[in-house]
Each structure stands twice: as structure tokens, then as C-alpha cells.
Image: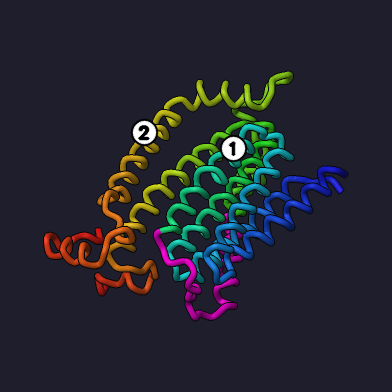
Amino acid sequence: MEIGLNHYLVLSTILFAIGLVGVMKRKNLLLLFFATEILLNSVNIAFAAISHYYGDLTGQMFAFFVIAIAASEVAVGLGLLIVWHKRHGTIDLDTMTSMKG
Amino acid sequence: MFEAVAFYLFAFLTIAMFFITVTTSQALYALTALAAGMIFISAFFFILGADFLGAVQIIVYTGAVMALYAFGMMFFDTTREVKEKQGNKYIIVGLSTLAAILVVVIFAAPMLSENIVALYPAIDGVGNTQMVGLVLFTKYLIPFEVAAVMLLVAMVAGIVLAGKKMDLSLTLMSPEEIKKKEKENKKVLS
């Protein structure tokens, strides 16, 4: 019953799949942001596990920078979302088709 | 034994929480489940001996990011049920699983192709936090500074985007007042 690197990679795969299902399924932009957080966290688990099983700290460093990027992404994204909501009263993806591409 | 029990318990809890986040139609449930999942993920970091990363996960994600989301949800109408795309469920799940496996293969390929040598191996008798500080402020000093500048940019962007017209409150103004403001300049709402 030894927990190896593969266990963590499988867990990371499952969480990444859940996050991707969320990204494809959601219409509400706020819930889309939640799904991207799940994606980033699942990759962080993989980084930490690889870092532990190879005795190397590079993976943990990368996870730190991923966390920093996630924090700034949330700040900017939520600001844009608030501006959009003030102007249009909705944050559904379907309403953002102003470019008619 | 203890490690295995902890791993399976937290794996089950994390998957359950994130599944709720993705499938629920209530935005508030999604937020709460996501916050719980973030804390459970920090448990994996503690099991893996990455103590500092676990603490940062709790502080940044459940402290800062979740508070920011909760703050943002006050602006949006979250009591309404969330509409969802009507797509083929099997295609969505199949494509997601395929993409996830691809990501893991990308991670695992360099490890399978033999001899990985640790670039910054852990030193015996040095704690994780001390080791992280040692590596972060020697080998990764430039990325650290760049990340700091990026966070500053994000802060400025957040203030500029969300902080506009914060002195006006539509809920505290009377309807006549709002009408008057709208006549003066049309952009009360942004």
C-alpha cells in the first residue's frame, strides 16, 4: 500500500478532467473562473508530487509561481467582470457576441 | 499505512468537492465547495513534505482568492440559477479526459526517458521552508522579482477596473437622484 508518484499523477489527471468539464460546460463567467482554478490546482499537485519523489525543489518553485499568476489573474479578471456586469447587467458568455465573428 | 489512508481520504474529498463545484447550479454552493477543495489540496502538500507550499496554498487561495470571489459575487446576481450549455455530455467528458491524460503524459515523458538528476537536491537536516528560501532567493531571484512586478500590475488593474465610481451607490440613492445623475452624464453605471 505504498503511495507512489503514479497515484498523485492519476489524481491530478482526474482533477484536471473535472476542471476541463467545467470549462466546457459552464456558461456563467464566474463559474468558468472557478473551473480554471481547479485546473491550476490539479497541475500544482503534480508539480509538488514530482518535486517530492525526485528530491528536487524546482517543482515546488514552479508551483509558487503558478499560485502568484493565479492570484493576479483573479484580480484582473474579476475587475473586468465587474465592469462588464455594471454595463450589461449579465455575465453570461452568450451575451458577449458583440464582434459577430 | 497512515500516508495511504490520508491520501485516499483527501483524494476522495477533493474530487467530491470539485465535482460539486463543476456540477451545481447554485453559485454560492460552487464557491463554498471550491474553498473546501482548496484546503483539502493543501493536505496533499503537507503529505508530500512541501510544508511551505501548503501554508501558501491555504493563505493565498482560501484566504485571498476566495475572499476576492466572495467580494465579486456581491456584485452579481447569484441567487438566480445558473444556465448551462446544452452540449453532448459524452463528448465533453471524453474530450476532457483525453486532454487531461495528454497533460499527464507531457509531464511524465521526461521522467520515463531515464536518468533525471535533481538540479537543486534537498540538503539533509534543512527544513523545507529554509530550503525553499535558499533556492528562491538564489536561483529563482529574477522570476521572483518579475512575479512581484506582475502582482503590482494586477493590483493597479484591479483598482482601476473595479474602483471606478465607487463613491456612487445605486442602492443608497433615491430614484430621482439616479434619474438626475443619468441626465447629467449617461455613464452612472460604469
Q: Are marks 1 and 2 on the same chain?
A: no
Residue type highlighted by circle 1: Gly
Q: Quadrant of residue A80?
A: bottom left
Residue B148, compared with residue B8, is above or below; it is above
> Label 2 belongs to which residue?
B149
Dot 2 falls on a residue whose secondary structure is: helix
Give how far across and how far down residue B122 sits, in percent: 67, 25
* Dot 1 crowding, Cα within 10 Å, few <14, some 14–19, many 20+: some
Marking on residue B22: none
Figure quadrant of the C terminus of chain A: bottom left
Give how far across and how far down residue A26 sits, in percent: 49, 69
Dot 1 falls on a residue whose secondary structure is: helix
Q: Nearer the viewer, residue A87 or B165?
A: B165
Q: Is residue B30 magenta?
A: no
Q: Is residue B81 magenta?
A: yes
Residue at the spot 59% in from the left edge and 27% down from the top edge: B132
> Label 1 belongs to which residue?
A59
* Dot 2 crowding, Cα within 10 Å, few <14, some 14–19, many 20+: few
Residue at the spot 46% in from the left edge and 49% down from the top edge: B68
Q: Which chain letter goes with mark 1? A: A
Q: In this view of the protein, can residue B117 be seen by the observer? A: no
Q: Using residue B188 as the reference point, say whether residue B34 is left or right of it.
A: right
Give how far across and how far down residue B80 sits, in percent: 47, 72
Q: Which of label 1 and label 2 is nearer to you? A: 2
Question: Which span is picked out in magenta?
Answer: B75-103
Q: Which chain letter goes with mark 2? A: B
Residue at the spot 64% in from the left edge and 53% down from the top edge: B36
